[in-house]
Amino acid sequence: MTALSITELCDQIRPLDEAAMAAAQARQDILTKPQGSLGRLEALSIQLAGITGQVLPTVDRKAVIVLTGDHGIAAEGVSAYPSEVTTQMVVNLLRGGAAISVLARQAGARVVIADVGVAGDLPEHPDLLNRKIAPGTANFAQGPAMTREQATRSLEAGVEIVMDQVSQGLDLVATGEMGIGNTTPASAITAVYTGLPVDQVTGRGTGVDDAGLALKIGTIGRALAIHQPDPSDPLGVLSAVGGFEIGAIAGVCLGAAAHRLPILVDGFISAAGALVAAALCPNVKPYLIASHLSVERGHTALWQTLGLKPLLDMGLRLGEGTGAVLAMHLVEAACCILSEMATFEDAGISGPQD
């Protein structure tokens, strides 16, 4: 992996730059508008200044990292789609035909596709990163989803991928994923960290019917009763009921925060990965930007646990990084307002009276 252990990497994640944030706030206060009139756009620009340490941050170099993997829990019938769809969709991603492919092109972001645990055979492709840990996780209704060593490797894979992107030039990273059945481990992780009943944090995923939803809720409940995951042991939670791509998303968050990069967290599965990262290292939280609220039942609870408020609410439930890439436009807008808008003095306009 990297020259650093996960613990050492976490130690490198520093608090936001208070001086840069104060300077950004001072500039916002003299721009040609009533103070605070651009609402969350102003707050976002100040957060970006704190993350990057730059009073006038820029996010010209953007990437969405799509982590892909399969899940043994799918054998329990918790998804409306068969597991082979993961492989088929990764091929679609590589061909540029997926929703995230289209939205990333529109946003001017590069798409980074990584296999951390797809069960099927994928073709050799220059745009596919092979970081496969195993051909899918084990069925966590019958035993742990993975070993602790595999959980560590999933974190390390995410760190390695984002560090490679940093070396190519990166200002803003978005998380994405693809993996049939992955709302089930995400719901399990959400139940562990929120303390809420499983039925309050488990949704329909790819669109299961009422019977399928009841089966999914029951499966997660039985698995949690078997494993009794300890929220103070995030690696243990990931091992018991997680997914390789969820662990890799956590690694992306940790690696990006260590490099003072803003992280646009996508939907329910990505938020579960971000929650694992925050459990490992609470200092990662201020680097996270909640891109959107999906229709998955547990997503609100995840954002609340992370202390984040999503930028968008558009009824999305696709994943792939789609909501995060849509939110890139707002992040860019926040930067542009801060750097390009005239001050009262620049424009020769009378400012607010003391």
Image: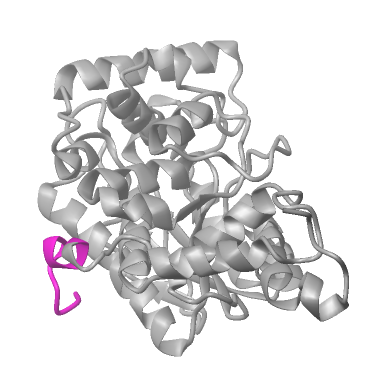
Magenta residue check for 8: yes
In this rendering, position of residue 153 left or right of residue 158: left
Residue 92, compared with residue 244, is above or below; it is: below
Q: Looking at the rendering, which quadrant does residue 145 occupy?
A: top left
Up-down relation of residue 245 to residue 341 (above or below): above
Instruction: From the top left corner, tell me how far across and down residue 54 is, in percent.
Output: 49, 77
- The quarter of the picture where residue 321 lies is bottom right
Residue 310 showing in the rendered view: yes
Vertical comparison of 305 with 224: above or below:
below
Q: Which residues are magenta?
A: 1-10
Q: Is residue 317 magenta?
A: no
Count up the numbered dots.
0
Judged left or right of residue 258, residue 173 is right
- Which residue sits furthest bottom? 168
User: Which is more toward the observer, 114 or 77?
Assistant: 114
Name which residue lies at 18% across and 35% down. Answer: 144
Residue appearing at x 30%, y 74% in the figure: 160
In the rendered view of the protein, which quadrant contains the N terminus? Answer: bottom left
Residue sitting at x 47%, y 22%: 202
In the rendered image, the vertical position of residue 117 relative to residue 113, given as above or below: above
- In the image shown, does 109 or 354 lie closer to the viewer? 354
Q: Is residue 15 left or right of residue 122?
A: left
User: Residue at the front extreme?
Assistant: 354
Q: Position of residue 200 (x, y in %)?
A: 46, 15
Q: Image check: 68 left or right of 2?
A: right
Name the one closer to the observer, 32 or 337: 32
